[in-house]
Amino acid sequence: MAELRTEEMILNMGPQHPSTHGVLRLVLTLNGEIVEEVKPVLGYLHRCFEKHAEAMTYPQVIPYTDRMDYLNAMSNELAYVLAVEKLLGIEVPERVEYIRVIMSELQRIASHLVAIGTYGNDSGAMTPFLYCFMDREKVLELFEIVCGARMLYNYIWVGGLSHDITPEFITKTKELIKYLRPRMKMINNLLSYNKIFIERTAKIGILPPEVAINAGVSGPTLRGSGVKYDLRKSDPYSIYNKFDFDICVGTGERGVVGDCWNRYIVRAYEIEQSLRIIEQAIDSIPEGDVQSAVPKRVKPVAGESYVRTESPKGELGYYIISDGSLNPYRVKARSPSFCNISVINQISRGHMIADVVMILGSFDIVLGCIDR
Amino acid sequence: MGNIFTQWFGDNLLTYILIPVPILIYVLVFALYAVLGERKVSAWIQNRIGPNRTDRFGLLQTILDTLKLIQKEIIIPNRTDKLFFRMAPYIVFTSVFLGYAVLPFSSVYIGVDMNLGLFYFFAITSLGVIGVLMAGWSSNNKYSLFGGMRTVAQIVSYEIPTALSAIVVVMLAGTLSMQKLAVLQAGGVFNWFIFGGPGSAVKIFLIPIMVVSTVILFMSTLAETNRTPFDLTEADSELVAGVHVDYSGMMFAMFFLAEYAQMFAVSGVVTTLFLGGWQSPFGNLIPFLNTPVFQVFWFLAKGLFLVFVQMWLRWTLPRVRIDQLMTMCWKYLIPITLVNLFLVGLYIILT
């Protein structure tokens, strides 16, 4: 009798798939419902950012950085602008630094809310997704007040900001802080501590700290594995060393350290920490002119600079080489999502299709950031 | 306990053609407005407004959607098994609709009051699995295939707790006829089978068992209709839409119709078995509320309430994974129902 032969099945998940968070393609090798191998195929959203940047003057690159990680435009601008300022060697006024920190923390809240909401959506719960987007809307309204744009701001300029903040912004921010805390409690009750949700995410896709560090994983994904590493503390940039906040790590409160649930919950905790930073910063913004240090012409001397920042997705760095002209000679972005997704094959082997969706969601990738 | 159509038109062919007409009309209207209802319920749960552009409160929304679906071209991909692909939606819908034949809408209106009613219902509605599997296989699409395979595993497994928790009632009532089951629960809310059915004060021991049985039956019917948290068949974040992936136009609408029709059908069964069917909750206190027309009202009200609970659950809970679904069925629900069955048997022997 001929031996029964079973074949592995290759399933293309994406580029058009509701839970690949954009145009990512995952080539799954399946044995029934069990995943044997995951191969991410990237490049569907490649927009030649780095090459474009070579043809632009330094300030003209800023809108392009907005479009890299489009859920997180402020932090992208901040990282790029810090790198250019380092190249120029200019000091920015204290007021600018404060506003930049407030903006990037607000952006972190908005980005994490999207992460939490879409993660709920991946697990089949549609309602938390809409709740999170409602709350994110409030943050976007704040951005709208200061610069008119809701997603892609071009707000942080080399040496300053495009607009100063208004008193309305300050009162609204304080209202937001008051509003968001009970909302987060509600979302946690609805989703984070939901029995089915925990069953779906706990002990799934366990990422050991050594693997994470070797693969260059960073941000909440790394902290979910219990590694206490946050660039805001371990390599402070801007004025983060002035504020008091905690680094949230996965503690294995549910499941085990390094699993999807711990990666997820780090984001929920971090929203609270961001609120703390904003609370401290909003009351102590010094007076000053936000454009006093903006150079007339950005023309750094030949040289190079690298600045790394803690974006909501992880370590975001910009490496800029200047040849002394108005355009950068080379801009290289170190994108957190790109490094984070590199471990997906290692940690999803042996899980089921539904788990791959959860693992992918727990990285909180943005394809604009991966493909640039 | 005759059928009112037989009384009016006599026992002839015309009667048998006319009997299903009100049910068919009801199913279509229900499906249309249940879709709207679902969208409204989800909107309220999510702090949205929901459809409101078509007539007042969006009342025409689903009717216009259906019109659009009818107009659309039915696209049949090249490599599908054409015959099965075309047949599948109709098999799914027909099997669900046939189940309505034994739902007692009122003491004077039931499709067929056969003495094996309950058995017939479970047998005929599980035929829908074949349609879903057909759709999954014939689409020649990996996502559809996964959806189809999952459904079969899921529905076949959940048939067991469904049947076992229904048998508890059958043992107490001693009949499989749906109409007789409803009649037995006359006399107010405490004579419903969720509270142990009609009987002496000893039945107080039955109440916890029956409540557990009701919940289990409701859960398993939820799994059989493929609703969240058990909607693995069409899990949109994993399988995109499962077996529906390649369907378009009216063929897709048939699947949709079948899903909503089944939502009410299973609610109707839970109602008839445990919640008193068409009996008024006030028993004979207000005789007026026990007239046949009001009986229809009670039956629909109870059924629609359960449909609402299904929607409520859908918009609150995440989805379980396939192995967790199976674990729950085989390791928890079936043992519990078996224990229930044993306890009820003991009760019957002792009393």
Image (cartoon, coloured by chain):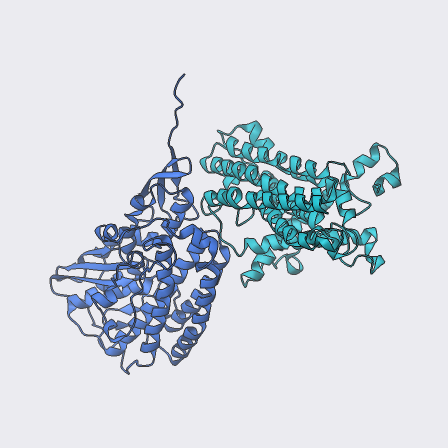
Chain colours: A blue, B cyan
Q: In the rendered view, would you say B144 is above or below B264? A: above
Q: Is residue B303 left or right of residue B140?
A: right
Q: In the rendered view, would you say A247 is above or below A361? A: below
Q: In the rendered view, would you say B58 is above or below B2? A: below
Q: Nearer the viewer, residue A83 or A192?
A: A192
Q: In the rendering, at what x and y percent does residue B331 appear?
A: 51, 43
| Circle count | 0
State which quadrant residue A234 falls in.
bottom left
Point 48% across, 29% down: residue: B79
State which quarter of the image contains the N terminus of chain A. top left
Point 27% across, 80% down: residue: A289
Is residue B67 among the parts visible in the rendering? no
Q: In the rendering, at what x and y percent does residue A42 appear?
A: 31, 45
State which quadrant residue A352 falls in.
top left
Point 23% across, 77% down: residue: A93
Residue sitting at the far left? A302
Is residue A302 among the parts visible in the rendering? yes
Q: Nearer the viewer, residue A149 or B119?
A: B119
Q: In the rendering, at what x and y percent does residue A255 appear?
A: 38, 54
State which quadrant residue B174 falls in.
top right
